[in-house]
Amino acid sequence: MSSRKRAALSGTQGPATLRLPLGPGSPLRCGRDDTLKDRPPMPKITFDKDTRAKLVGGLSDYLRTELDLEVKGFDAEFLLDFISERLGPYYYNQGLHDAAALYREKLEAITEAVWDIEQPVKPL
């Protein structure tokens, strides 16, 4: 099919445009979409004491070995809080999108399985 015919069918002119998922709830719009204001807030990310200590320790170790920075104690905890509060919603939203995609995939498989058992009918 020619590019002109393809453009006429798609209603666009010129090269195809990349359409990013910028609808409500898109991870690319996280925190910038006014339509999300009325939605319930994301649950606060919390960790039990032992897990938090492991995360802080891992973060401190990473900063020391990879970036030659000494960040310990409260500073490392504050950095973990920052990461959780600022970056957490992006990971949370991506998890929701991944879960929704998996749900759609499984639902499609179930729908196909239902139609697979459809019986042929003879005309009346």
Image: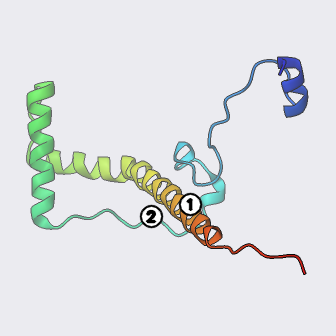
- Whether 20 is drawn above or below 17: the answer is below
- Quarter of image, res 19: top right
- Whether 1 is drawn above or below 115: the answer is above
- Using the image as rendered, state which of residue 106 and residue 91 is in the foreground: 106
The numbered mark at residue 25 is none
Q: Residues within 10 Å of mark 1 (few under 14, many from 20)?
A: few
Determine the secondary structure under disc 2: loop
**Residue at which label 2 appears:** 42
- Using the image as rendered, state which of residue 28 and residue 1 is in the foreground: 1
Q: Amino acid at mark 1?
A: Arg
Residue drawn at the location 9% of the way across and 31% of the way down: 64
- Using the image as rendered, state which of residue 105 and residue 14 is in the foreground: 105
State left or right for residue 34 relative to residue 10.
Answer: left
Determine the secondary structure under disc 1: helix
Q: Name the spot of residue 30 as percent of width and height, x first.
A: 52, 48
**Residue at which label 1 appears:** 104
Mark 2 vs 1, N-terminal side? 2
